[in-house]
Amino acid sequence: MASNCRGSPATGHGRPTRLHELTPSAKLTYLVVDRAAPQRLTVTQLRERTRLADRTLRRAIADLDEAELIVRRWRVADGEGPRREIVLADAEQSRQDTAGE
């Protein structure tokens, strides 16, 4: 399992730059995404696994995205509408680096 306290670049706007500065719901959401890696999770899967209220989960995802700890991507599966997937920012960067080689 990956570390649960990854840093991100300083934002300069007083935004959290480390996981320990985020809310408990954002930490829980990060932990669930981290444990699922390298699998990408949809918002529905995150809601089921964290059991957070919709509004709380949306805020947690937004906080993690703002801190550059996760990446949100749209995916269109066969026979399904578009779904938003969540993955750790480090995992997404590693995937892109490997694809570019």
Image (cartoon, rainbow, N blue to C red):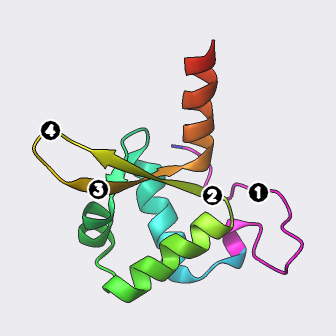
Mark found first going from the N terminus, 3 or 1? 1
Q: Which residue is mark 3?
A: 83
Q: Amino acid at mark 3?
A: Arg
Measured from the top left, where is residue 82 in percent x and y? 26, 54
Viewer-nearest of discs 3 and 2: 3
Chain part drawn in magenta: 2-20
Mark found first going from the N terminus, 3 or 2? 2
Label 3: state its secondary structure. strand
Mark found first going from the N terminus, 4 or 2? 2
For label 4, count other residues whose C-alpha is less than 10 Å away and answer few (under 14), some (14-19) or many (20+).
Answer: few
| Prevalent SS, magenta region | loop
Quick one: which residue is furthest to the left in this view? 79
Residue 8, disc: 1
Viewer-nearest of discs 3 and 1: 3
Residue 92, disc: none
Question: For residue 91, which quarter of the picture?
Answer: top right
Instruction: Measure the alpha-carbon separation of dots 3 and 1.
Output: 26 Å
Task: Kindly check if marks 2 and 1 are in contact, taking CB atoms under 8 A apart as contact.
Answer: yes
